[in-house]
Structures are given as C-alpha cells and as structure tokens.
Image (tube, rainbow, N blue to C red):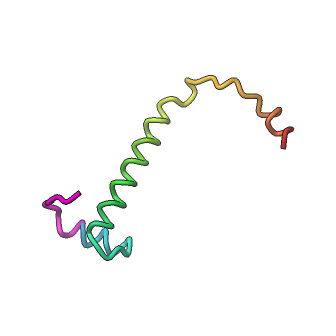
Amino acid sequence: MRTTLDLPQNLVEEGMKITGFRTKSQLIKFALEKLIAGEKRRRLLTYQGKIDLDIDLDELRERK
C-alpha cells in the first residue's frame, strides 16, 4: 500500500542506523510488526492466572 507520512527525520535516521535497514519502508514494516507483536503479548498477559487449562505437566513430561 502506498501512503504519505510526515515522520520525524531524527527518528527515521536513528531507526535506520540501529536496524541497518536501507529503506524507510523496511523500517516502518519492521516497526509495525514489533508494535503489533508487543501489543498481542501485552494483551495475552492480561489472562495470566485466569485460564485453567487443566494440564498435568508431569504426565506431559512422561510422554517424551
């Protein structure tokens, strides 16, 4: 998808420097993927301790 963005030049330059990406598109795609993955992890953590999976870890270990 083509789009026009007004991005702070210093952030783009620093992002490209630390990632080694050669294009802004690579940098933006990477940043969006990381943002989405982090947000999904954060949302999953809200379920920590609230879901009973009824799993017997000892039984699972014996199967291997």
In percent of width and height, residue 47 lies at 51, 29
Q: Residue at x 42, y 47 (%)?
A: 38
Extreme-front residue of the structure = 1
Indicate the quadrant containing the C terminus: top left, top right, bottom left or bottom right. top right
User: Would you say residue 7 sits in the magenta stretch?
Assistant: yes
Would residue 39 appear left or right of 15 to someone viewing this image? right
Residue at 54% across, 31% down: 48
Where residue 19 sits, quadrant-wise, is bottom left
52 on left or right of 3: right
Looking at the rendering, the stretch of residues picked out in magenta corresponds to 1-11
Give the answer, above or below, for where 51 lies relative to 4: above
In the rendered view, does 15 fall on the left or right side of 8? Answer: right
Residue 33: where, in percent of width, then height?
38, 54
Position of the N terminus by quadrant: bottom left
**In the depicted structure, whether residue 60 falls above or below residue 12:** above
Q: Position of residue 44 (x, y in %)?
A: 48, 35
> For residue 53: magenta?
no
Q: Residue furthest right?
A: 62
Question: How many numbered circles does the render carry?
Answer: 0
Magenta span: predominant SS is loop
- Residue 6's place in the image compared with 48, above or below, is below
- What residue lies at 82% left-to-right and 32% top-to-bottom? 59
Q: Please tell me whether residue 59 is drawn above or below residue 40 in the rendered image.
A: above
Q: Quadrant of residue 11?
A: bottom left
Front residue of 48/34: it is: 34
Q: Picture coordinates of residue 61 (x, y %)?
A: 82, 39
